[in-house]
């Protein structure tokens, strides 16, 4: 069985990439492979906000990622630089930058690009969805 | 080194195809599945079935199809994958 990591750069509000990545993740996990980390970069980080609030008849990508990650014990990591630029922040970064609030979903973490490099080194395959 | 090229934008096909060698594999996903209706099939070209069906093209395509299980397997059969965005 192989170890996978995914790199997701797709905007959750305007492209199909996040859906494709979720389908790919579910399939590899069903096949018995391991998912180490999903790294969100560029507009892909927009999915990490816990206050994303799509209409009730639409798919909630944030909750879907969170549920899948908790169920299968893999990491959801958003790049800190591009996340902060887009207003996605955790409490620590919010305080450091004197922001009035934070919005990172508790199933996600924000970290540096080193986490992407590590995922590439420690996984058999890295697949990108943009 | 066998590379899987994953293409999701039909407008980038030419550039993507010119980067490929004969031992490489192409998988069309998302909007790029529209190309399966326009281009000749090849032995190393595949198209993602779910995305074809979603666009009402499932009966038109003569291309070889892969479902998500086949997609995962393709990434393992090749040494690495390049997503041509």
Image (tube, grey):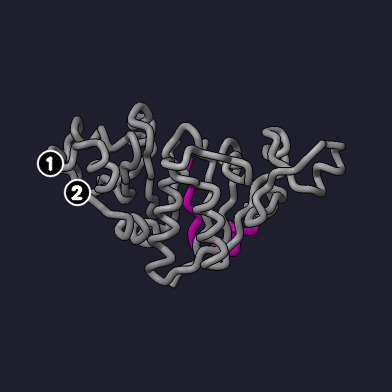
Q: Nearer the viewer, mark 1 or mark 2?
A: 1
Please determine if labels 1 and 2 lie on a single subunit. Answer: yes
Query: In the shown orientation, is residue B21 left or right of residue A56?
Result: left
Place residue B21 in its image quadrant.
top left
Is residue A74 magenta-colored? no
Residue B77: image x %, image y %? Answer: 35, 61
**Which label belongs to residue B80?**
none
- Label 2 neighbour load within 10 Å: few <14, some 14-19, many 20+: some
For the C terminus of chain B, the image quarter is top left
Q: Which residues are magenta?
A: A117-130
Residue A112: image x %, image y %? Answer: 72, 48
Q: Earlier in the sequence, mark 1 or mark 2?
A: 1
Query: Residue B63 or A92: which is nearer the viewer?
Result: A92
- Label 1 neighbour load within 10 Å: few <14, some 14-19, many 20+: few
Q: Which residue is mark 2?
A: B64
Judged from this view, the residue extending furthest toward the front is A56
Q: Chain of mark 1?
A: B
Between marks 1 and 2, how big is the CA–CA gap?
Answer: 12 Å
For the N terminus of chain B, the image quarter is bottom left
Query: In the shown orientation, is residue A72 left or right of residue A113?
Result: left
Residue drawn at point x = 39 percent, y = 57 percent:
B75
């Amino acid at each position: 069985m192989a170890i996978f990591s995914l790199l997701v750069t797709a905007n959750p509000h305007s492209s199909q990439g996040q859906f494709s990545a979720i389908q790919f993740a579910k399939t590899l996990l069903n096949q018995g492979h391991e998912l180490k980390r999903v790294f969100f970069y560029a507009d892909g980080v927009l999915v990490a906000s816990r206050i994303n609030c799509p209409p009730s008849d639409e798919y909630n990508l944030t909750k879907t990622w969170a549920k899948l990650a908790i169920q299968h014990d893999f990491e959801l990591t958003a790049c800190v630089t591009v996340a902060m630029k887009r207003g996605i922040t955790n409490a620590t970064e919010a305080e450091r930058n004197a922001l009035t609030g934070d919005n990172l979903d508790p199933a996600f973490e924000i970290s540096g690009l080193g986490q992407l490099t590590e995922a590439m080194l420690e996984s058999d395959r890295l697949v990108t969805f943009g | 080194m066998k590379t899987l090229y994953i293409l999701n934008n039909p407008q980038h096909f030419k550039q993507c195809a010119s980067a490929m060698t004969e031992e490489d594999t192409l998988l069309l996903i998302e909007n790029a599945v529209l190309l399966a209706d326009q281009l000749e099939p090849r032995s190393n070209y595949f198209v993602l079935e779910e995305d074809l069906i979603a666009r009402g093209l499932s009966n038109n395509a003569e291309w070889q199809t892969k479902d998500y299980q086949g997609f995962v397997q393709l990434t393992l059969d090749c040494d690495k994958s390049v997503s041509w965005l």
